[in-house]
Image: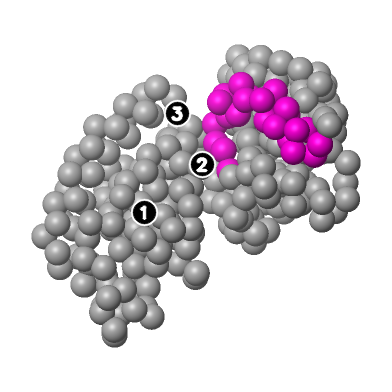
Amino acid sequence: MIEYLVVTGLSGAGRSSAAATLEDLGWFVIDNLPPALIGRVAELAGRRDSDLERLCFVTGRGGPDSIGDLVAIVAGLRATGARVRMLFLDSSDEVLVRRFEGTRRRHPVEGPTLLDAIRTERALLQDIRQSADVVIDTSSVNINELRSRLSDLFVDDRSGSAMETAVLSFGFKHGLPLDVDLVLDCRFLPNPHWVDELRNLTGLDEPVREFVLASGESQEFLDRVTDLLTFLLPAYAREGKAYLSIAIGCTGGQHRSVVIAEELAARVKELGFHPNVHHRDIER
């Protein structure tokens, strides 16, 4: 049976870049498809003589008036028994303004100002965003980072049964990640930044790892979070959640959060899940 992916989101948030990446990852991508045609194209693709296995619809470029009831369309696809996922690409108003001004493109939504048009589109797409299986905020993501995130999420995985999990480290001073489900703060742990020989290292270096994990509070924190996830992960999976992302934050995102994210990912794996690990701010 064909696996479907629907990609939508705010204008300027990266749909074209996502389409190109997904095509490289082996998806058959149909870009700029009106939502009303998704069901018909899926019906043709699902015929017995079709050799398609992974079909991606990128939609929304025509503006929110062309979106229609995308939530109902996706629900109809799922009713066929196929595996269907929806990705929503988001970005901050400020970043979208800069992107449109930089390219001199016209925003597809009418408004007295560019910012008004962006905010109108955001309000119109709110229900679709809330229905998405996964949301990626591209505000501070470059094309290579977006490619990496999409590769983690949509590589060729035919199991289709287990909930996909991700563990992200980040620095609070660089902003809270907006596309995660659970956020944990480890800024109470001893900070390697104040140790001269550790300051220029990261949480991927063994001396920093040993320093952070030497704290009794680190071990207790990991144990308590593991207990919580032992309860939460199977519960989310039973409810049919396709993705769960867990973010661990420290001040700069280079030391403590990196160590804790790596350790927590190892424990999540022991629980029977296979998390992707991403360190958002480790190079800052």
Q: Whole-percent x and y of residue 174?
A: 48, 58
Q: Whole-percent x and y of residue 16?
A: 77, 46
Q: Earlier in the sequence, mark 1 or mark 2?
A: 2
Residue 125 to residue 29: above or below = above
Give the residue at the far left of this rendering. Answer: 216
Q: Whole-percent x and y of residue 97?
A: 74, 47
Q: Which residues are magenta?
A: 113-136
Q: CA distance from mark 1 to mark 2?
A: 14 Å
**Could you say which is closer to the camera, residue 171 or residue 180?**
171
At 36% from the left edge and 61% from the top edge, which residue is drawn? 251
Q: Which mark is residue 99?
A: none
Q: Which residue is mark 3?
A: 241
Q: Earlier in the sequence, mark 2 or mark 3?
A: 2
State the scheme by which the image is colored. Answer: one colour
Q: CA distance from mark 2 to mark 3?
A: 15 Å
**Could you say which is closer to the camera, residue 48 or residue 220?**
220
**Magenta part mainly helix, strand or loop?**
helix
Location of the N terminus by quadrant is top right
Q: Which residue is mark 1?
A: 249
* Amino acid type of the residue tagged 2 in the rendering: Asp
201 on left or right of 76: left
Q: Which residue is mark 2?
A: 179
